[in-house]
Amino acid sequence: MELIVGGATNAEIAAKLYISENTVKAHIKNINRKLGVANKYELLAALIKAQAEPSSRTNG
């Protein structure tokens, strides 16, 4: 997720993770489906929003 939020292209993500670009696309497609977003831009918005919200988990 850090690579996506950081603005990395699919090709850059693939190179960094030693996987094919098609594998990156498949994973992003699955993430989009699970989060109910239509594209990479909506995914970015959802990730940024989730990072900005306080966590509901407790530390103790």
Image (cartoon, grey):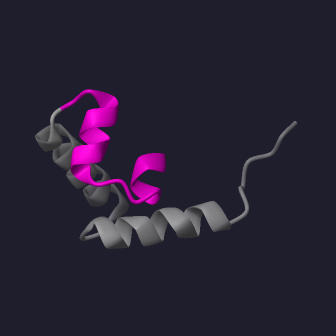
Specify whether 50 is left or right of 34: right
Tell me what residue is drawn at x 35 percent, y 72 percent.
Answer: 42
Quarter of the image for the C terminus: give it.
top right
Image height check: is 38 above or below 31?
Answer: below
Write the start and end of the magenta stretch as one range: 1-19
The tally of labels here is: 0
Furthest toward the top, the residue is 18
Q: Residue furthest left?
A: 22
| Relative image position of residue 50 (x, y in whole percent) | 57, 63
* Residue occupying the point 21% across, 30% down: 19
Look at the picture and state if 30 lies above or below 19.
below
x%, y% of residue 43?
37, 65
Position of residue 9 measured from the top left corner of the image (x, y, whole percent): 28, 54
Is residue 34 visible from the viewing direction of this image?
yes
Q: Is residue 40 above or below residue 1?
A: below
Q: For residue 38, which quarter of the picture?
A: bottom left
Left or right: 35, with 51 as reference point = left
Residue positioned 29% across, 59% down in the render: 32
Can you see residue 1? no
Occupied quadrant, residue 33 = bottom left
Name the residue: 71% across, 56% down: 55
Q: Is residue 2 magenta?
A: yes
Q: Is residue 17 left or right of residue 22?
A: right
Instruction: Please name whichever residue, 47 or 16, is drawn nearer the observer in this view of the structure.
Output: 16
Q: Does the magenta stretch mainly form a helix, a strand or a loop?
A: helix
Pick the front one: 7 or 28: 7
- Pick the residue in front: 11 or 30: 11
